[in-house]
Structures are given as structure tokens and as C-alpha cells.
Image: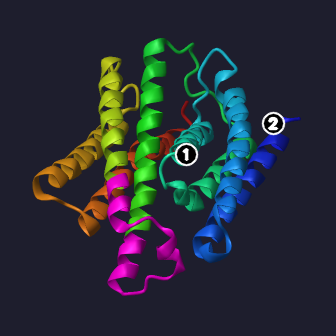
Amino acid sequence: MSHPAIALVAVILYLVAGGLIAFRLFRRESVGNGGRRAALAIGYAGLALHTWLIYDAIFSQPGLNLAFFNALALTSWTVVTLLLVSSLTKPVENLGILLLPLAAVTIFLEARYPSIDFLRQPAGWDIKVHVLLSMLAYSLLTLASVQAILLAVQDQHLRGRRPGGFVRALPPLQTMESLLFEMIGAGFVLLTLALASGFAFLEDMFAQHLVHKTVLSTLGWLVFGGLLIGRLRYGWRGRTAIIWTLSGFVILILAYFGSKAVLELILQRG
């Protein structure tokens, strides 16, 4: 089966899995655990195909082909992997209502617009470690941002005394908040390691076109670090935590994908 055909099947599987999660979330009274298991099983099937696509597009040649749409697909793969694995032990599968369709979009874009290599030379182990840490950090903080969105919706419904089916299907507010800070804490540690490993081989950020990425990544790190300090010292929660989480996430997205989009899609520099 060709790369585009496999991509199409993976897109369909992710959309079906996301649809099942959405149906279960909004109509929980009519869909039990069987619907959850079916959604996860279909999600894992899509992930298996997604894995093959990522390997074929990025790792099958000597260099790492981290062009813009490939990087998007790799990030979504990491996000979905963390989501599905975490769903085995924690009630986080509802995040798939947004993340699985977004992953389907990245697969479509990667297959539709194959891109040139970003790292043309054979990548050393230090670069591979940096890429791995960066992808894991971005992915965990992406999960945290979607968790923050659901938490905001849940908080607004409860404040308005409208605990409908959607809110009733979510875990308790305290559990949702605890999961949020677990994700942020783990993501912050990985982001710290990613930044440290990145600075290790940073020579001339201007010549390497890494000024915006370096500055914005550091700013995002400061935002998440400030949020964790505020949580520990001042007990920040609720809307404050949501605003800081989403702000830090937007900064990190601009740091990596914003600079790559400008360099590759607008300026067309490798």
C-alpha cells in the first residue's frame, strides 16, 4: 500500500476514534465502557499506521527530514502516543476529542505536501536527543493545553450551574486540575532538558536562524516555570492556571512552528 493510501486510512481511523469519544462524551448515558474501549482500539490502529508514516517520511533516510509538515506529523504522533498510553491508567481519553482530529489533519498535510529535508546532514546522537526531548516536551504541554481548555469549559458550566451531560462525563474538577499540573510539571522538566541540550550545540543563533526559536522557547519556559512556582507558593488554580498554561503553549508553538513556517514556507530556506 502506498504512502498516500496508508495516510488516508490513518486519517479515517483517527476521525472515527475522535467521533466515538465525542459521542461518548456528549451522550454518556447511552454509551458505556464498550464505546471507550472501541475508541481506544481504533485510535491505536490509527497510531500504528501513523508510526509507519513517520518512519517513512522522517527516519528512512540518513538525515532527519524534519521539514515543516513532517515535524507537525511527528509532534502529533508523540501527542497521540502519550494520550493513548496515558488513557490506560488515567481518565484523559476525552482529550482525544480535539487531538485525534488535529492529528488526522497533520497526517493529511504531510502526505499532501511532502517537503525537503530540514536536517540534510546525518544527525548525531546529540541532535537526536535534543529532537526527542523537544518533541516530548511540546507534546506533553500540548496535552496540558487541551486539558486546560476542557477545564475552562467545565469550570464555566459549574459556575453557571449547568452540569449537563458534557460536564457529567468529565472527571471531577479537582482531578482535572491535578492532571493538568502533572502534565505541566513533566513537560517543564523535559522542556528544561531540551533547552539545555539545544544550547549545547548552539554556535551562532543568527547564522543558524535560531534567534526567534531560542528567545521564544526560553520565554515559554519562564511562563511554565512561573506557573509552577505560583502553584506551589500561592496555590494558583482555576482561571489563572488556565491563562498561564495557554499563554505558555502559544509561545512555544510560535517558537518552533512559527519560525519553521517563516523559514520554510515563506522564505523557503532549508
Find disc 2 in the rendering and name its residue.
Answer: 3
Q: How is this picture coloured? A: rainbow
Q: Please state the extent of the stretch shown in magenta in the rendering.
A: 152-179
- Judging from the image, what secondary structure is the residue with disc 1 in? loop
Q: Are marks 2 and 1 in contact (CB under 8 Å)?
A: no
Residue 87 x, y percent position in the rendering: 54, 49
Graded by Cα atoms within 10 Å as few (under 14), some (14 to 19) or many (20 or more), the crowding at tag 2 reads few
What percent of the width, then of the height, locates residue 197? 34, 22
Residue beneath disc 1? 88
What type is the residue that disc 2 sits on?
His
- Classify mark 1: residues with Cα within 10 Å, few (<14), some (14-19) or many (20+): few
Q: Front-most of 217 and 27?
A: 27
Apparent side of residue 66 relative to residue 60 in the rendered image (left or right): left
Farthest right residue in view:
1
Q: Amino acid at mark 1?
A: Leu
Q: Identify the element where label 2 is drawn.
A: helix
